[in-house]
């Protein structure tokens, strides 16, 4: 029911299509994050108009509120939020990690306290799959043990070994052919641990593979290097997903290292904070320089914000009007969506390096070796 067609490669970048029962996902592709069953600030039609093929839902948040059983009674996540394309759900592992002091990990489970009411919740690999099945996502993720970087070697090795054991438990628990299961490669910034983890997981029957444990405080260059040493050990005929990444620069540098899928809250979170992504780098719309600027954020952008002047968008933020965050969330997701579409075309036409180098220089970065 799931198949990945690798159609073309250009300078390490991959152009593909991930076929799912609910529709095709063009890759490289970006998945807008719908944490609690909504991409913040946008209607589902507005999300679709940004060019997204697949969106993401957060298992941890939906488990707590409204509760996975309630989502199931409301017809599942697709029915509930009105999105009929594919949906990927994470496993809850990253949220347990990001809640830091509230969690405890044993071989059996990750135990944490709800950030809503303090109640104690035990997340086993099996329970994570049960929740994702109740949500009805098209792609489920294995529960992994996420740690902060930098960390002691023994801590990294312990989390990696547990992540592999938990991946097996998730594989055994996942029994719905209409729901794909992606494994998550851990191993910190250590190339040998990444190789070991990728090799072990690649030998197991997963429909896709994620690179996890990045974007947790390491330098961009460390992230790119780790992606590169991981993807070489992953099957070429399965999609590769870099979790929780990132800036437009991160997207292109990691596509150059063989990544197909991304998700990140950055376009919407930054949009809510008056920051707009453009080909010339980010623009802060609260700045006084935009006060009487009649130009749109980007001349050729088809989004809802770029029908208006920068001066108007700035005014909306200054007046605390809810339309400001809505417009910039739409602009940023449209920007990411177009960036991915342009990237796919550049790969098809064998000019990915030149394309990526041009974009990176526009944002103020010198392209790294994989792109230059
Ligand atoms: Zn725009």
Image: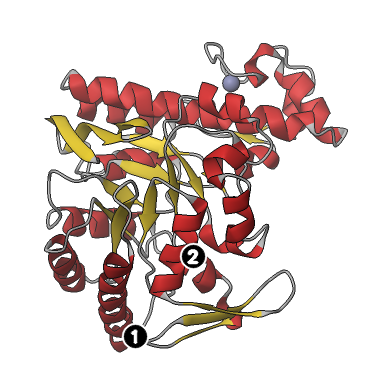
Q: Is mark 1 within 8 Å of ligand 1?
A: no
Judging by the rendered image, the residue that carries numbered circle 1 is 155
User: Which residue shows up at 52% across the image and 26% down it?
Assistant: 48
Tell me which label, 1 or 2, sits earlier in the chain.
Answer: 2
Q: Give x and y (percent) for residue 336.
A: 46, 31
Q: Secondary structure at mark 1?
A: helix
Q: CA distance from mark 1 to mark 2?
A: 20 Å
Q: Which mark is residue 260?
A: none
Quadrant of the displayed image that contains ligand 1 = top right
* 279 versus 213 height, above or below: above
Asked if residue 268 can be seen in this view, the reply is yes
Q: Give x and y (percent) for residue 68.
A: 58, 59
Is 307 positioned to the left or the right of 261 in the image?
Answer: right
Q: Secondary structure at mark 2?
A: loop
Frontmost of labels 1 and 2 is: 2
Dividing the picture into quadrants, the one containing residue 47 is: top right
Judging by the rendered image, the residue that carries numbered circle 2 is 92
């Amino acid at each position: 029911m799931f198949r990945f067609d690798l159609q073309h490669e250009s300078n390490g970048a991959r152009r593909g299509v991930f076929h799912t029962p609910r529709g095709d996902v063009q890759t490289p592709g970006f998945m807008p994050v719908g944490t609690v069953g909504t991409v913040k600030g946008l209607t589902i039609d507005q999300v679709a108009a940004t060019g997204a093929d697949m969106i993401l839902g957060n298992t941890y948040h939906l488990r707590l509120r409204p509760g996975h059983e309630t989502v199931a009674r409301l017809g599942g996540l697709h029915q509930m939020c009105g999105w009929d394309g594919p949906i990927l759900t994470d496993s809850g592992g990253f949220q347990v990690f990001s809640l830091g002091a509230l969690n405890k990990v044993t071989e059996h489970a990750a135990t944490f306290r709800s950030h809503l009411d303090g109640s104690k919740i035990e997340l086993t690999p099996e329970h994570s799959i049960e929740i994702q099945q109740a949500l009805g996502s098209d792609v489920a993720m294995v529960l992994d043990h996420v740690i902060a970087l930098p960390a002691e070697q023994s801590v990294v090795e312990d989390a990696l070994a547990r992540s592999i054991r938990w991946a097996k438990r998730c594989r055994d628990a996942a029994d719905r052919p209409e729901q794909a299961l992606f494994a998550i490669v851990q191993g910190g910034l250590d190339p040998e641990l990444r190789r070991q983890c990728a090799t072990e997981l690649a030998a197991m029957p997963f429909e896709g593979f994620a690179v996890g444990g990045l974007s947790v405080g390491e330098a961009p260059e460390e992230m790119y290097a780790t992606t590169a040493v991981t993807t070489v050990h992953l099957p070429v005929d399965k999609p590769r997903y870099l979790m929780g990444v990132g800036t437009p620069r991160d997207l292109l540098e990691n596509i150059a290292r063989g990544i197909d899928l991304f998700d990140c809250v950055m376009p919407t979170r930054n949009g809510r904070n008056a920051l707009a992504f453009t080909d010339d780098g980010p623009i802060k719309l609260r700045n006084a320089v935009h006060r009487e600027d009649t130009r749109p954020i980007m001349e050729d952008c088809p989004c809802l914000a770029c029908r208006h002047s920068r001066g108007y968008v700035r005014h909306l933020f200054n007046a605390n009007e809810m339309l400001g965050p809505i417009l910039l969330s739409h602009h940023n997701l449209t920007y990411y969506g177009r960036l991915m579409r342009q990237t796919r075309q550049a790969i098809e036409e064998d000019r990915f390096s030149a394309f990526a180098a041009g974009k990176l220089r526009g944002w103020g970065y010198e392209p790294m070796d994989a792109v230059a």
